[in-house]
Image (spheres, rainbow, N blue to C red):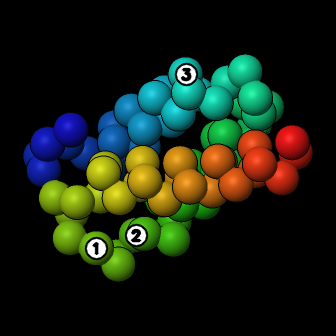
Amino acid sequence: MTANTHPAELVQSVLHRLENEFGGQLASAHIVETVRGAARDLEGQIVPEAFGEMLYRLAYVRLDRAVLATA
């Protein structure tokens, strides 16, 4: 993920990565909504170059908490 990558492409990339990591533990719809929500929360809050990494980290933490809550 580079600074020149379009934000929608970054969201799709992060979504794919997190679906691979959490797909067996959470519903796909929950993963999609979590990633999209994290993207909305980060929009305009950080420098564009950090968007992909920060999106992954924020969504990962939220999904991990969801897994722990269902355990």
Three-letter amino acid code at the position of disc 2: Glu
Give the alpha-carbon distance from disc 2 to disc 1, as whole Å.
Answer: 7 Å
Number of the label disc, if any, that sits on residue 10: none
- Residue occupied by mark 3: 20
Q: Secondary structure at mark 2?
A: loop
The x and y percentages for residue 20 are: 55, 22
Q: Neighbour class for label 1 at 10 Å: few (<14), some, many (≥20)?
A: few
Tag in front: 2 or 1 = 1
Q: Neighbour class for label 3 at 10 Å: few (<14), some, many (≥20)?
A: few
| Residue 26 as seen in the image, left or right of residue 20 | right
Q: Residue 13 falls in which quadrant of the image?
A: top left
Q: Secondary structure at mark 1?
A: loop
Number of the label disc, if any, that sits on residue 46: 1
The x and y percentages for residue 1 are: 21, 38
Q: Secondary structure at mark 3?
A: helix
Identified at 64% across, 48% down, the residue is 64
Three-letter amino acid code at the position of disc 3: Asn
Q: Neighbour class for label 2 at 10 Å: few (<14), some, many (≥20)?
A: some
The x and y percentages for residue 61 are: 56, 55
